[in-house]
Image (tube, rainbow, N blue to C red):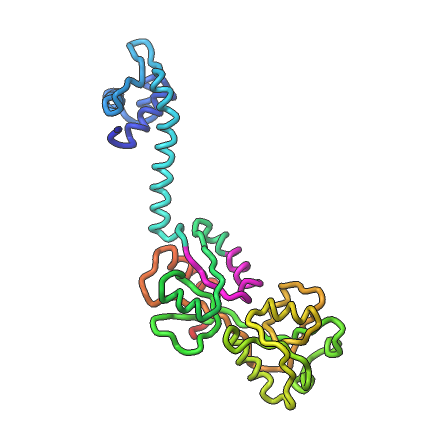
Amino acid sequence: MFNDFNQLRCFITLAEELHFGRAAARLYMTQPPLSRQIRLLEESLGVRLFERNSRMVRLTEAGTAFLLAARQMLTMAELSVDTARRIHKGSAGRVALGFTAVSGYWLIPELLGRVQRALPDIDITLKEMVTSDQIAALNAGTIALAMMRPAIAEQEGLIHRRYHREPMVLALPVGHPLAERAQIGPEDLRHQPMIAYAPDEGRYFYEMTLELLAETLPPPRFVQYIGQTHSIMALVNAGMGIALVPASVRYLGFSNVVCKTIWPTLRQAETWLAWRNAPATAAEAALRNFILDSLPGADAA
């Protein structure tokens, strides 16, 4: 086979010019080295690529057939070198990113839009998971970054930064008596049928709901416990109850649901960016740094 890709460049240039002098000038070399490269290529292939004499140069039938393959090989080689360099620099590569379902309503699409503009050659593989599964996936190395809820306990070997905060709102069916209120107070939820997060699948929001309702006496009537926010919203949309949910549910667009501001509270739903305290690929580090650098309001957790 040919010795190096320089021989391919020499062959392609001569095939295009069909003149040793013009081809050598394009390659910034003299004619003898060009003739030597062509001869070496022909010897390695075992075929004659050009018919040539003192008056003319033309491709043989084998040379014509080889020209297309030579161009393809040279293009692939140049692309491979360019890709390897970009991966080394962190401007290209694949990164697995975990996220919770609620983050997918607005946070993840907004982030991906910015990443696509700033780091177009980084390919992000999205994996929707609850927070506990994201922690396990980070520790197993199956994802590099995670958009998750604050962990129940400090996780050894993980680093995290607070990425986003959003208020909780009360989701009500259209026509509900509370839907006309400008603001909802905890006393308004007495005896109300409430759809709550399940304590196992939705533990973070389950505990937040109990905290927000701690002073509501008598408490609401919990009629269903559901793990996922979109399922809770579907039940509210069907008129089966009300629910305390993160404000980003507005992006789901349920036609029979209104979301009302609740009583003043410092408690907000938080999303963390987390990663392993371990060496990262250049692409993983580039994406992580972009996310952190583009959010000056984020603070260490």
Question: Looking at the magenta stretch, what is its main secondary structure?
Answer: helix
| Extent of the magenta region | 95-114
Q: Nearer the viewer, residue 128 or 35?
A: 128
Above or below, 6 against 291 in this view is: above
The answer to which of 204 and 241 lies nearer the viewer is 241
Residue 248: image x %, image y %?
A: 60, 68
Furthest toward the top, the residue is 55
User: Where is residue 25 shown, x and y percent of the image?
Assistant: 32, 23
Residue in the picture at 74% in, 71% down: 174
- Quadrant in which the C terminus appears: bottom left
Residue under the image location 24 percent in, 30 percent down: 3
Q: Foreground residue, 202 or 168?
A: 202
Query: Which of the pair 255/23 is nearer the observer?
Result: 255
Determine the image quadrant of residue 47.
top left
Is 110 part of what is drawn in magenta? yes
Lateral position of residue 127 relative to residue 74, left or right: right
Give percent across and percent down for residue 216: 63, 88
Do we see residue 298 in this rendering?
no
Q: Residue 173 location in percent, x, y?
A: 71, 72
Is residue 75 visible from the viewing direction of this image? yes
Identify which residue is drawn at 34% across, 37% down: 77
**How many marks are shown on the rendered structure?**
0
Q: In the image, is residue 157 part of the stretch drawn in magenta?
A: no
